Image (cartoon, grey):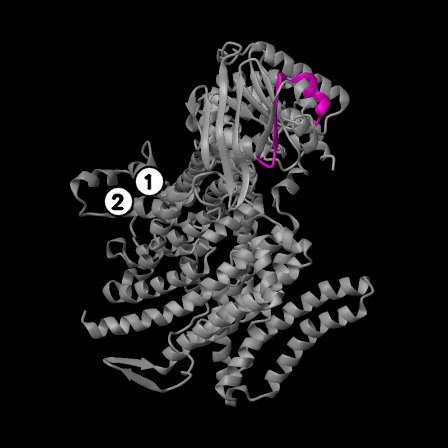
Amino acid sequence: MDFSIALILGQDGITNGAIYALLALALVLVFAVTRVIFIQQGEFVAYGALTLAMMQSGATPATVWLLVAMGVLVTALDGAKALKAGQGRRAAGVAGWNLAYPLALAGLLGALPANELPLALQVVLTLAIVVPMGPMMYRLMYQPIASAPVLILLIVSVALHIAMVGLGLLFFGAEGQRTPSFSDASFELGPLMVSGQTLWVLVVSVLLIVGLYQFFERTLYGKALRATAINRVGAQLMGISPALAGKLTFFLAAFIGALSGVLIAPITTIYYDTGFLIGLKGFVAAIIGGLASYPLAAAGALVVGLLEAFASFWASAYKEVIVFTLIIPVLLWRSLRSHHVEEEE
Amino acid sequence: MRTDRLVLGAFLALLLAVPAILSPYYVTLLNYIGLYAMVALGLVLLTGVGGLTSFGQAAFVGLGAYTTAALTTATELPSWIAWVGASPWLTLVAGLILTAVVAVLIGSLTLKLSGHFLPLGTIAWGISLYFLFGTMESLGGHTGITGIPAISLFGWSMDDGGEIYYLIWAFLLLAMLTTHNLLDSREGRAIRALKGGRVMAEAMGVDTARARMVIFVIAALLACASGWLYAHMQRFVNPTPFGVHIGIEYLFMAVVGGAGYVWGAIIGAGVITVLKQWLQDWLPSLLGASGNFEMIVFGILMVLVLHRAREGVWPILRKLVPVRAVQKTIDAKAETLPRRTLPKAGELILEAKNVTRKFGGLVANNNMSLEVRAGEILALIGPNGAGKSTMFNQISGVDTPTSGEVLFLGKPVAGHDSREIARMGMSRTFQHVKLLPTMTVLENVAIGAHLRSGKGVLSSAWRLDRAEEARILKEAAWQIERVGLKDHMYDEAGSLALGQQRILEIARALCADPCLLLLDEPAAGLRFKEKEALGELLRKLRSEGMATLIVEHDMDFVMNLVDRVVVMEFGQKIAEGLPDEIQQNPAVLEAYLGGVE
């Protein structure tokens, strides 16, 4: 290995690390607010990437029908409840967001020649399809058992991951997809060739992290989420609805996931089941942060990305093994530091 | 004839007759069900009983399968290991040893942490091992290993499905029997306390990290044995059946069948296996594409089960079969457990010196000192939030003081594990009752005797512990009678009134045969007569030489019972003395009633 190869690997590592960092942040956020271990984060990545690819191939992305189906269920549950309570306006609101919006989106996609639209609009449409699935998923799958033990919530996550992979195969087929790059520009930085897509990934990641930071520091909703993460019951007593906090968290997580998918689709080929491994690497990073610390998780993500890049050069067959082995020293360190027995939630 | 034995007998007769009645297709299906049920059984122990879970069980199955495959087919092994390949029975042992070592390694990394680190760790382990199987040339890469010999037993070679059927089901039934036995024992009670009762179990001397390790290793060994059988049934292995997604499927089996029940494993394995066969035939033609679409149905089914019937299918099925639970019998002739000799009255038992505990800026205990002597009841009183329960936690090892010293029987114990302190002879109850609501009163109290007995996992699993178990139950029954709960001995602990639950905690604490008893608000929720009875009991214990430290708000109860009183407010000691003195103390009156402006 010479210096220029190391630079290229480093660039790869940092690019992937930036994505893992985004995912890790979402995982920590979801766990802190809802105690859900968001195994299906990776599927949102794959759904984002493959929905965009399907749109570009000229077909109507099948994910929109999943959105419609989930919307129908949410409308049936929440709409009926609101009607029973005599809250007509509320029922209309529920139906508007969960029924009319997905149907309108499906109609729009059917009418538009989506594959001829500019890339930016395609990306917006992709997010418009995939992101609302996050809060709907929370409503349907987690809200009814929001107070269940972490273990039960984890098993639900795993079950949903399995179902989403199966649906992914049904929607997108077994073929892998790669979307065209956001920009064809490339820059020479000394001996290093930096591609436009790499810059896109880095810039968007940094912007998103800064945006999230501002959201949590400066907005009422952000503060409400932080309060819920610190003390669920206390936050509820202050009037912060745990259901709203859950949906908002899942919205953010789904947004981060789908956007990550759109960003990396030009860099690596995405299959219906690729998301799992990508999401798990986010997990390795989140575990480095103890599922609690954002900066540690982000730093861990860069380590994971770099380790993966260099491992693929030296021992590519064992790349995954090496990355997952990274959690051993972390767990060891945490294990040695833990003293008193605590009751599981 | 007991109905449970009748039903079991009918089931066994049916199993025995299967290869003679059913076609080979169904025998093969039952072989798979048996293999899967064995893995699911491990998850029942781990998830349903122990409150942990693993997504890496398929990897342990793979470890068992690949160990035997590699050893029995290899031709160029170094001689120190080659002899193992001579017989599948030797490779089974090799696989089990290897699995145990791996499980202990993974367990020691994750089991001391919160419960969700084990499943996350096992996902990583499952993926890593899967990739290793697929990439290592010596293991045949993705094509796998062929030509694995059949198992033979006393010259009988099990070549086809109808023959290995008996071996598979014999293994499974043996595993179920040992699991059942294990759960109904001293170690079993400790394991059942893991879910929701760890702090209590530690206070009763149970090493809960070890108990977690025990069930994780057992679950891994069951998976490994299943893999060994699988390899010799299929006669070839490749990495596919050992991936993380199959590991998740095993978890589905346990949860759908009923993760809290030994029989749930068979039911779950049966339901998922049959459903999978059926969906694999039916879904691709319906959807017009080929793929593992049954996973969609399984995923959603799983969520529905967890939403609607978290206990799984087994409890629903069980109601249809007229089997009554068998009540435990107390053997009055069993030897009594040995008792410790209590220190002489007046001897110093507990001494807390300048104990301070800070939580961030909050000083919950500030420079607290107190001492308790044998044959004495000391009351620790004070308004709500004075720091009494925090003080209890510092003394009993649930928490560690920021500074200061706690001497128990002359030895420093601050910062030690609560089970170490329990072993020395301190036993406690909790302000917020901590018991296992679905276990009987008898079993709850028997946990108290954990440290007075010593039979381990293997003796429990193979019923070599019955003499000791009878002694434990006799002791527990005696303590229950002593505190006046005899009529409720076989009731579920969760069905008792709160006051009775507090009394149950005292019986459990006494079952540990302590020389120092810490009681946190024992009289709260008791009726007048019950309070009188409790007072009588505590006086009797005092006369036997027991040292008692009691936190209590009921002043009538305290002042008529105790020898000395320590009063706390805002984490500090504000008074100490005889009950009569304390009732006249101006500082105490001010703390309780507010000062005169």
**Of tags 1 and 2, which is closer to the observer?**
1
The residue lying at 30 percent from left, 45 percent from top is B67
Residue B233 lies, with reference to residue B527, above or below; the image says below
| Residue A45 visible from this viewpoint | yes
At label 1, counting other C-alpha atoms closer than 10 Å, the crowd grade (few under 14, some 14-19, many 20 or more) is few
Q: Is residue B533 magenta?
A: no
Could you say whether the residue bearing mark 2 is in a helix, strand or loop?
helix
Label 1 marks a residue whose chain is B
The residue lying at 76 percent from left, 24 percent from top is B527
Give left or right: position of B495 versus B544.
right
Task: Give residue B71's mark.
Answer: 2
Q: Which residues are magenta?
A: B554-571
| Residue B13 visible from this viewpoint | no
Q: Which residue is at the front of the view, B398 or B66?
A: B398
Q: Give the mark, 1 or 2, whose residue is nearer the N terminus.
A: 2
Could you say whether the residue bearing mark 1 is in a helix, strand or loop?
helix
Residue A119: % across, % down: 48, 85
Per the image, the residue denoted by label 1 is B101
Q: Gap between marks 1 and 2, in whole Å? A: 18 Å
Mark 2 belongs to which amino acid?
A: Leu
Give left or right: position of B581 versus B206.
right
Residue B586: % across, % down: 68, 27
At label 2, counting other C-alpha atoms closer than 10 Å, the crowd grade (few under 14, some 14-19, many 20 or more) is many
Q: Residue furthest right?
A: A86
